[in-house]
Image: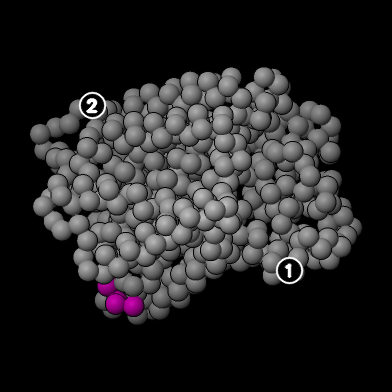
Amino acid sequence: MSGSTSASDTKSGSGPVTTSAPSNKLRLGALTALVVGSMVGGGIFSLPQNMAVSADAGAVLIGWAITAVGMLTLAFVFQTLANRKPELDGGVYAYAKAGFGDFMGFGSAWGYWISAWLGNVGYFVLLFSTAGYFFPIFGEGNTPVAIVCSSVLLWCVHFLVLRGIKEAAFVNLVTTIAKIVPLCLFILLCLFAFKFQIFTADFWGQQNPKLGSVTNQVRNMMLVTVWVFIGIEGASIFSARAEKRTDVGKATVIGFVGVLLLLVLVNVLSLGVMTQPQLAVLQNPSMAGVLEHVVGHWGAILISVGLVISLVGALLSWVLLCAEIMFSAARDHTMPTFLHKENAKKVPANALWLTNGMVQVFLVITLFSKGTYLSLIYLSTSMILLPYFWSAAYALLIAVRGETYAGESQERNKDLVISAISVIYAVWLLYAGGLKYVLLSALLYAPGALLFAKAKREVGQPVFTAIEKVIFAAVVIGAVIAAFGLYKGFLTL
């Protein structure tokens, strides 16, 4: 953020800055835009095809019902924790650490960070794949020219963020508003083109044996629903920079409800415009194909332009979130102290350099390993499931213990039910993802222990407690199995 640090500002490593001028803080609109901007990226523009590959209309409706309940309880969890634990800044990482120890806190920060920057790699490739619709030289977004242009854009975003968090958040607010317009126009046009007989033609997908049972269809679409909702925790990550603490919870719920409505309408209306087999073979961004079917070629152009705006905004949101989660974790020595360094604009510079350096490396990798990269996009979704689980589990823990609920038995009982449903939903997501992604996640979690050990040594503490040694051993075993599986070919990315 702009402005210099005064003598009374909190020093690095001693806790959140509490003396920043109100003008440098993020208000409700900016926080809500961070939530919406983080969730509405590229996922919604590919949603019709992504869902149709796994499920037909009946299963889609069941899946969205489960998602609506599960994600709404998760939104309420973040709202409750923001209000009842205002001293915990940094969202998912801070809740895991407070409830289950340093290593779980580190794991949540590490997993969230990996998920976030892998998603950014996906955004860059999808962005220039969309540009390939107009300029064939960009191909599928992973040609040499596309990677060079992606790299230029990456570092432009990088230096924009270095100019200040508040300034970058304002740009994000503008792009968030701009990208909602084509989505609303898509919904309006498809509403008039919707045909009930198309929507109900093969309601349960019985004519397509590849889809399997309704249960399998619902399970197979779950990771897609999580992918499009990643970012729901955006406001809680920036809780230390909020002008009003209560705005964090408000922004989370407002952003969730708005995005849920957009997602369901885009998905359901598409199934009433084109059949499931037709949607399943569309090239992404599949919303372009749907609108082209309704109004002609200009519809595809409109959606493509909307996607470009959306991805630029989402890239900015996730660059901010990536840097902030590492910075927050370094502030209380969960991450090494070098990640806590800020520049004169109060931007976590080292965390930003590390994040975008990893994005750059994986952009180059996409030139040589396209298949592996595409699989890692799904892996990035599974990487965020544990941070979500620990947040829900912490909310359940404080409700069970009655922390902060003195004389509020009715509120406590309500939060017990909400957090319990959220925990069950998080476990269901892990099951839906399957053992493959649990093992592959372990392979990415294990190397992070090196940074955790460095952070612990900096403060002269033992690296692991007794129970953390057991947990780390389980992670290493999973990582070894995953590595062996990749080597032998019975586990693939």
Q: Which mark is residue 156?
A: none
Name the element at disc 1: helix
Vertical comparison of 390 with 106: above or below: below
Can residue 223 be seen here?
yes
Q: Which residue is mark 2?
A: 344
Where residue 134 appears, x then y in whole percent? 71, 22
Q: Toward the viewer: 258 or 131?
A: 131
- Give the residue type that dot 1 points to: Val
Vertical comparison of 132 with 410: above or below: above
The residue at the point 77 percent across, 41 percent down is 282
The residue at the point 48 percent across, 34 percent down is 362
Q: Which residues are magenta?
A: 400-405
Q: Which residue is mark 1?
A: 214
The picture quadrant where one finds residue 299 is: top right
- Give the residue type that dot 2 points to: Ala
Q: Residues within 10 Å of mark 1 (few under 14, many from 20)?
A: some
The residue at the point 27 percent across, 56 percent down is 88
Relative placement, left or right, of 414 versus 12 is right
For marks 1 and 2, the one nearer the N-term is: 1
| Image quadrant containing the N terminus | top left
Residue 2 counted in the magenta span: no
Residue 402 counted in the magenta span: yes
Q: Residues within 10 Å of mark 2 (few under 14, many from 20)?
A: some
Q: Toward the viewer: 352 or 75?
A: 352
The residue at the point 64 percent across, 49 percent down is 262
Choose mark 1 or mark 2, whichever is in front. Answer: 1
Q: Toward the viewer: 493 or 230?
A: 493
